[in-house]
Image (cartoon, grey):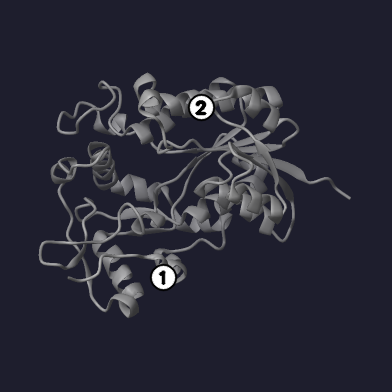
Amino acid sequence: MTEKKLIAVVGATGSQGGGLVRAILEDPTAEFAVRALTRNPESAKAKALAAAGAEVVAADLDDEASVRAAFEGAHGAFVVTNYWAERTPEQDAAQTRAEMELAQAETAARAAKEAGIAHLIWSTLEDTRPFFAGRDDVPSLDDGRYKVPHFDAKGEADALFTKYGVPTTFLRTTFYFDSLIAGMEPSRNAEGKLVLNMPMADQPLSGIASEDIGRTALGVFKRGADQLGKTVSIAGDHLTGDQYAAALTAALRETLGEEITYQPLTWDEYRALQFPLAVEIANMFQFYAEDSIRFTGDRDLAKVRELNPGLRSLEDWLTKHKHDFKLEPTL
């Protein structure tokens, strides 16, 4: 019997890594075995993965020795960093979130090189700085180093995997449909109407179900050497704000009985919102909107579907998740 190739998955209890672990375990070809890396193997999510058949090991991207040990004997590795991880004020004071991601990416690259990983997938995003070069209307962050730190640091980190000579596929992701449940969900305006106010102007926004990132990563691993050195940009749909609102209205009509309309804030209005990272999120949407032709064009849905035949559109995703929405009731 041919021995299965082992894939080590960083962030195995998160959205992207968890999606890949489940995709490997559910793959009818059973081509790969999976090693799930997590900081806490005793968590409920980690135990569920173990019960489903994954090998679960403790590893932390802030502890290089643990990552090196977890990569030992693996054919492939999936690496994702979590810019949004819960951190203490002391951690934020000592190191920015972008610096954390860069350091963690370098840790993963060194560990992969030393372990002899034959195929690594790095979950990344575009570096927005070349697009925004010379633009004073888009505020710089992190002492002027970045425009959209959670994009730019990942894009900057691409070079680290090349620097260390790691055979890598660069998997560029995008906006999660899941954010429509929490983070970018419709809210009620002053008139009590449900509105979607993400600042995309009239431009299409590429979105994807978080689970499909892992499923597409499995497709990349299955293609093998053909994907090494390539940038694979992915999405499940390209829709305008009006189309997002219409899809939400159709999916939630039975439970809500009312229309959701698209009423985008301007980028400056969004930057003025009183929540942490409002400026960064506004800059992100400005990048999505102003570079939408290139951004959506790079994410060819037909090509993504070749890697992941079950790729979900927004309508598909809403059919499965419409009961997960907890929107504000009418007054």
Residue 104 is tagged as 2
Determine whether, in the image, residue 145 is placed left or right of residue 71: left
Residue 111 rendering spot, x and y as whole percentages: 63, 25
Residue at image x 18%, y 45%?
Answer: 270
Q: Residues within 10 Å of mark 1 (few under 14, many from 20)?
A: few
Residue 144 rendering spot, x and y as whole percentages: 25, 22
Task: Please tell me how many numbered marks the rendered image carries.
Answer: 2
Residue at image x 59%, y 44%?
Answer: 12
Considering the numbered disc 2 on the image, is that residue within a helix, a strand or a loop? helix
Q: Is residue 318 visible?
A: no
Determine whether, in the image, residue 68 is placed left or right of residue 265: right
Furthest-left residue in view?
Answer: 191
Residue 323 is tagged as 1
Q: Is residue 88 above or below residue 206?
A: above
Sequence-first tag of 1 and 2:
2
Amino acid bearing label 2: Gln
Q: Residues within 10 Å of mark 2 (few under 14, many from 20)?
A: many
Residue at image x 68%, y 32%?
Answer: 70
Between marks 1 and 2 in the image, the one whose residue lies nearer the viewer: 1
Furthest-right residue in view?
Answer: 1
Considering the numbered disc 1 on the image, is that residue within a helix, a strand or a loop? helix
Instruction: Identify which residue, 263 or 95, lies in the foreground.
Output: 95
